[in-house]
Image: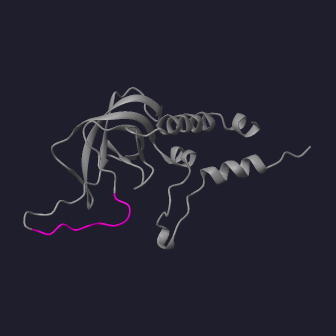
């Protein structure tokens, strides 16, 4: 008896890349399970502080937020806090006109923010970054769907841990 390959194809589509426009720029974030599968670490946490000095890696400058971990979903072992880098928006110099930016902006973390973070490890630098411009941070405040997003992330991790059982289901 030959097994159907439809469940495997469906799983690969879910884990596949999101829609892309010219030049490989993502038009919309991939579905939740695909974002979780690509992340090095997935957690629920609160920003407790911003480090006073930015970190430069290559040509990119990162501001570092210290995140206290409330729920370790994937890729975190014994850590109680993580350093999460984000690209700060440039502030105009005094007397300079404000420049408006259109389109997607990088997430700007601030002390007190709480949410679901899908992170990518920065090799040799000792911190993580938020995966992508959109879809890498989901704020818990005033978000009725937050618990559902966390449940989706946990379900995706559970499915990745046991692919055979997931495909049979």
Q: Is residue 137 positioned above or below 71 on the image? A: below
Would you place residue 79 above or below residue 144 in this image?
above
> Magenta span covers which residues?
96-105
Q: Is residue 45 left or right of residue 164?
A: left
* Residue 98 counted in the magenta span: yes
> Residue 9 appears at what percent x and percent y?
72, 52
Rendered location of residue 2, percent (x, y) = 89, 46
Q: Is residue 58 left or right of residue 9?
A: left
Q: Is residue 103 magenta?
A: yes
Residue 71 falls in image quadrant: top left
> Does residue 62 appear left or right of residue 93 in this picture?
right
Residue 72 location in percent, x, y? 44, 30
How many numbered discs? 0
Q: Residue furthest left?
A: 95
Q: Residue at x 25, y 54 (%)?
A: 88
Q: Nearer the viewer, residue 57 or 92?
A: 92
| Placement of the C terminus among the 4 image quadrants | top right
């Amino acid at each position: 008896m030959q097994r159907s390959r439809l469940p495997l194809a469906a799983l690969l589509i879910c884990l596949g890349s999101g829609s892309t426009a010219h030049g490989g720029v993502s038009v919309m974030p991939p579905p939740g399970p695909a974002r979780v599968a690509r992340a090095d670490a997935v957690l629920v946490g609160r920003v407790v502080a911003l480090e006073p000095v930015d970190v430069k890696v290559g040509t990119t400058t990162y501001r570092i937020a210290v995140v206290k971990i409330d729920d370790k979903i994937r890729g975190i072992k014994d850590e109680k806090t993580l350093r999460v880098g984000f690209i700060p928006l440039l502030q105009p110099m005094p007397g300079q006109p404000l420049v408006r930016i259109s389109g997607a902006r990088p997430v700007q973390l601030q002390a007190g923010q709480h949410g679901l973070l899908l992170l990518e490890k920065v090799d040799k630098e000792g911190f993580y970054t938020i995966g992508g411009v959109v879809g890498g941070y989901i704020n818990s405040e005033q978000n009725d769907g937050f618990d559902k997003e966390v449940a989706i992330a946990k379900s995706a991790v559970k499915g990745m841990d046991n692919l055979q059982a997931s495909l049979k289901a």
